[in-house]
Image (cartoon, rainbow, N blue to C red):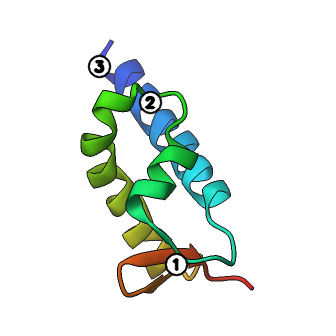
Amino acid sequence: AAVRRIAQLVAHRREREAKVLAALDATPRPLRELVERAYTDTKRELWGYAERSLLAHLLLLEQVGQAAREGERWRNAVR
């Protein structure tokens, strides 16, 4: 049961990462706006918490060259 649950969590994390990447475009956007774009399946009252998860995704995407930070805003690194 634990192995199955871990696999589900990993799959969910990858799906969310894909949504975060899809939310990024050439326009630098603040976390608040990206949450609205990437967490459409999450209740609005949880978006404050979702921002932390979003930031973790963005930092990872930045490390692999897929996201770029401009001050407090984020965009797709591939222009």
Query: Does 17 appear above or below 8?
Result: below
**Residue named by callout 1:** 64
Q: Nearer the viewer, residue 20 or 2?
A: 20
Tag 3: Cα neighbours inside 10 Å, few (<14), some, or many (≥20)? few
Q: Secondary structure at mark 1?
A: loop
**CB of mark 3 within 8 Å of CB of mark 1?**
no
**Residue named by callout 3:** 2
Q: Secondary structure at mark 3?
A: helix
Q: Viewer-nearest of labels 2 and 1? A: 1
Q: Secondary structure at mark 2?
A: helix
**Residue type (three-letter) at the residue carrying disc 3:** Ala
Distance from disc 3 to disc 2, alpha carbons, whole Å, reads: 9 Å
In the drawing, what numbered circle is on residue 22? none
Q: Position of residue 3 (x, y in %)?
A: 36, 24
Q: Position of residue 14 (x, y in %)?
A: 53, 45
The quarter of the rendered structure image containing the C terminus is bottom right
**Residue type (three-letter) at the residue carrying disc 2:** Ala
Q: Is 57 positioned to the left or the right of 17 in the image?
A: left
Q: Earlier in the sequence, mark 3 or mark 1?
A: 3
Distance from disc 3 to disc 1, alpha carbons, whole Å, reads: 29 Å
In the drawing, what numbered circle is on residue 7? 2
**Residue type (three-letter) at the residue carrying disc 1:** Val
Query: Does 55 appear above or below 76?
Result: above
Query: Does 28 appear above or below 53?
Result: below
Q: Nearer the viewer, residue 52 or 64?
A: 52
Q: Earlier in the sequence, mark 3 or mark 2?
A: 3
Q: Viewer-nearest of labels 3 and 1? A: 1
Q: Position of residue 26 (x, y in %)?
A: 69, 78
